[in-house]
Image (spheres, rainbow, N blue to C red):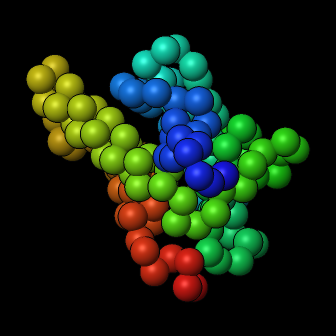
Amino acid sequence: MGCGDEPAGLAEFGLTPPISVLAFTGFKDGGTQRLELSGGDGQTVVLCYDFRADQPEPRHLFVGVGHPSEAGGMKVPVGHPCELELATVMDSWWHRQLTEMQLTGVSPADLDLDLSMRVQFLIAELRDPSRSAR
């Protein structure tokens, strides 16, 4: 992964800009997050961020599976360029969600706080350069 002239970031997994979030869900295993992304050419990729309560840190992103316990996923090294790119994609997606809620008259009191916290936590984790040292 990420050697020589190979594409870096999410392009390495077949996603070309613009990248969209199709789905973002969580598991009640401590907080594992499942994401489905779509690239500009229509390619879709499933990823998950392992936050199972019984797993040691650092936490890892997996590509190709919706949960880290599924067979066939690729564990992404902490600090891989796709982590920062994914954080940026998630941040943009979340801000668009908030803007749409405002434009459609959804009250801030109706905001799904659990979803908001999970999105913001994932973004912060992926952007944390000290995560690999934990």
Is residue 57 something one can see in this rendering? Answer: yes
Quarter-of-image position of residue 20 = top left
Image spot of residue 106 (x, y percent): 19, 29
Q: Is residue 24 left or right of residue 51?
A: left
- Residue depicted at 52% across the width and 30% down the height: 15
Q: Is residue 49 above or below residue 44?
A: below
Image spot of residue 22 (x, y percent): 48, 25
Between 126 and 108, the one lying in front of the other is 126
Is residue 110 something one can see in this rendering? Answer: no
Q: Is residue 95 above or below residue 83?
A: above
- Residue depicted at 63% across the width and 47% down the height: 48
Q: Is residue 96 above or below residue 71?
A: above
Q: Is residue 125 left or right of residue 47?
A: left
Between 39 and 46, the one lying in front of the other is 39
- Residue depicted at 20% across the width and 26% down the height: 100
Image spot of residue 29 (x, y percent): 70, 58
Quarter of the image for the C terminus: give it: bottom right
